[in-house]
Structures are given as C-alpha cells and as structure tokens.
C-alpha cells in the first residue's frame, strides 16, 4: 500500500511538473506569437511608409515631366509664332514693294486712281486669302 501511495504521489507530482512545463511552454509560445504580431505590424507600417514615399516620388516626377513638356511646347509655339511673324513681315514687305512699284510706274487721273486703288485692294485681298 505504501508503494502504491508513493507511485500515486509520484504520478501526481509528475503531472504537476508536466502541467507547469506545459504552462511555461504555452507562455513562451504566446510571447513568441505577440512578438511575431508586433513584427508583422512593424513590417506593414514600414511597407506603408515606403509605398507612400514612392507614391510621392512618382507624383513629383510626373509633375516635373509635365512641366518640362509644357515648357518645351510653349517654347516651340513661341518659335513657330516668331517664324510666322517673320514670314508675314517678309510677305508684307514684298507686297508693299510690288504695290509701290506699280504706283510709281503709273500716271494717275481721277478715274484711273479709283480703278487702280480697287485693283490693288482686290490684289491685297487675294494675297491675304492665300496666306
């Protein structure tokens, strides 16, 4: 009977030791799980911040690109405007010279003046329509 009591007592003590070991192991796993959750949250936070920074960089690069393209387009438009203006000035000068030469070569009387002025106006209108 003493042996049996001793074995039961040893079994109870072993069960208590096993229970304490299991509780200790459970506490360790719970601690590891909390640390893992904390690490996951930190990784997600860092990833979100990185994504936000990259997004801002992409937006800023896009805005700079649009500004550069706009500036280049405006410069091109200004150059084309200046070229068109120079061409217009040359054509106007040539037309004035042609009209002046015709006027200088003509001796005008009253009716001739009106007809010639009308003819020149028609010529100017035609030239304007072409350009």
Image: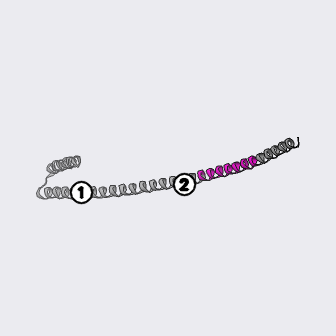
Q: Is 63 positioned to the left or the right of 79 in the image? A: right
Dot 2, crowdedness within 10 Å: few (<14), some or many (≥20)? few
Mark 2 or mark 1: which comes first in sequence?
A: 2
Quadrant in which the N terminus is drawn = top right
Q: Is 7 positioned to the left or the right of 85 in the image? A: right
Q: Nearer the viewer, residue 105 or 44?
A: 44
- In magenta, the rendered stretch is 21-44
Main SS, magenta region, reads helix
Q: Is 121 positioned to the left or the right of 78 in the image? A: left
Q: Which residue is mark 2?
A: 50
Residue 73, x across and y down, in percent: 36, 54
Dot label at residue 64: none
| Magenta span contains residue 88 | no
Q: In the rendered view, would you say 29 is above or below 85?
A: above
Q: Residue at x 67, y 51 (%)?
A: 32
Dot 1, crowdedness within 10 Å: few (<14), some or many (≥20)? few
Q: Residue at x 80, y 46 (%)?
A: 16
| Magenta span contains residue 27 | yes
Q: Nearer the viewer, residue 7 or 128?
A: 7
Q: In the rendered view, would you say 8 is above or below 83?
A: above
Residue 88, x across and y down, in percent: 25, 55
Q: Nearer the viewer, residue 68 or 37?
A: 37
Q: How many marks?
A: 2
Dot label at residue 87: 1
Is label 2 in a helix, a strand or a loop?
A: helix
Is label 1 in a helix, a strand or a loop?
A: helix
Q: Residue at x 13, y 52 (%)?
A: 109
Residue 59, x across and y down, in percent: 48, 53
Residue 108, x across and y down, in percent: 13, 54
């Amino acid at each position: 009977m003493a042996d049996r009591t001793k074995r039961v007592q040893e079994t109870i003590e072993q069960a208590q030791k096993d229970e304490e070991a299991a509780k200790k192991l459970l506490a360790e796993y719970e601690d590891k799980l909390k640390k893992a959750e904390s690490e996951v949250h930190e990784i997600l936070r860092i990833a979100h911040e990185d994504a936000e920074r990259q997004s801002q960089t992409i937006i800023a690069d896009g805005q700079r690109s649009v500004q550069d393209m706009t500036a280049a387009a405006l410069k091109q438009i200004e150059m084309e405007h200046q070229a068109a203006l120079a061409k217009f000035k040359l054509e106007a000068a040539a037309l004035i010279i042609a009209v002046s030469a015709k006027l200088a070569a003509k001796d005008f009387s009253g009716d001739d003046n009106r007809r010639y002025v009308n003819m020149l106006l028609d010529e100017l209108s035609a030239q304007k329509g072409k350009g």
